[in-house]
Image (cartoon, helix red, strand yellow):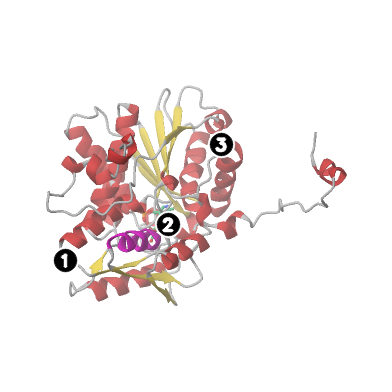
Amino acid sequence: MSTGKYAVKKIGIIERYQEYLPVTDATPIISLNEGNTPLILAEALPRELGLKTQKIYYKFEGLNPTGSFKDRGMTMAMSKAVEAGSQAVICASTGNTSASAAAYASRCGIRCYVLIPEGKIAKGKLLQAYRYGAKVIMVKGNFDQALELVKEISADGKITLVNSLNPFRIEGQKSAAFEIVDDLGEAPNYHVIPVGNAGNITAYWKGYNEYKRAGRSEILPQMLGFQAAGSAPLVSGKPIAKPETIATAIRIGNPASWEGAIKARDESNGLIEAVTDEEITQAYRFIAEREGVFAEPASAAAVAGVIKLAKRNFFKDNARIVITLTGSGLKDPDFALSFDDKIISADPTVNAIREVIEL
Ligand code: AN7
């Protein structure tokens, strides 16, 4: 039997970035080959915005094993949980964390409990948690309430919390910054990212800093975070009791990594601003319909942010801008199908089809 090169290639983030991660030879690596996601050069977006000298890239995290960036943190959190002898994990989630936790728990055979806000998560995420075999608990409340519950339930240490309060989640997620620097040969000038519970912006900032200290890059990006207008506590400066947005992934009123986000913003001379649901929707449609890149609404918040900033000539000439597209568009079929441009129905005849084709 021959061994193909992909069979022996180590491509999960732990193997790839071991020297930057808190793992030892005793750590069992629970991996689904996460990471190594593409950095796609934007074409239509800079053209549309009149950004002639700047380059925009999409870091497309929708191509991770469960379709979101959460897998980077989950491979670390789950590996450390198993190393510590844990038998069960728990999380609160707006959807993607629960899908990822369920997959990695399935991979290593430990129990998984997920608390999600009833009626407020995208269908694809719900069915993932369910199909990977997690115990799915619908909470009659929002994400922030669910997070308080799992913090309390995991406090005695019998069950491992795998929300981003678990520091190993942040450790794993910082690998996305490493990949970007590896691909570009240098850090970008701007890193644009949607912000919900604020673990990811915290993780990227940590990653860029560690890589710079290791001599892998000379510059640090300005971190540009975007929240949905109805769920923008980091913009208003205070928690929001009843967050709302169509981007359900970031429908969060009291982010766990509040301080990490502020630190990333201030140390990088960056910003955290809000974009409306309408702006998110336009950006969501633009990247799918004009770039061929299908990301979920929360991810589109970052694209909406770039559009907003470009309109006020924010970006300096020749800059490199990376936008993290955090999750796949396939996660949220209900939103995807909610527009006026309905799918056309036709009789099975050549004439009927010709009538529809506009040539
Ligand atoms: C697609 O799954 O919080 O600021 O429970 O799924 O690190 O929270 C998801 C967050 C952006 C925000 N984009 O990241 C959860 C959860 C997508 C997301 C975010 C999330 P953080």
Identify the main secondary structure in magenta. Answer: helix
The magenta span reads 97-108
- What is the secondary structure assignment of the residue under circle 2? loop
Residue at 25% from the left image edge and 59% from the top image edge: 78
User: Marks 3 and 2, Cα distance to the nearest angstrom?
Assistant: 28 Å
* Whole-percent x, y for residue 105 in the image: 31, 63
User: Marks 1 and 2, Cα distance to the nearest angstrom?
Assistant: 38 Å
351 horizontally vs 49: left or right: right
Residue at 18% from the left image edge and 46% from the top image edge: 21
Residue tagged by mark 3?
A: 291
Where does ligand 1 appear, by image quarter?
bottom left
Residue at 41% from the left image edge and 33% from the top image edge: 321
Q: Residues within 10 Å of mark 3 (few under 14, many from 20)?
A: some
Marked residue nearer the N-terminal end (1 or 3):
1
- The label number, if any, that marks residue 85 in the structure image: 1
Q: Is residue 189 visible?
A: yes
Q: Quadrant of residue 152?
A: bottom left
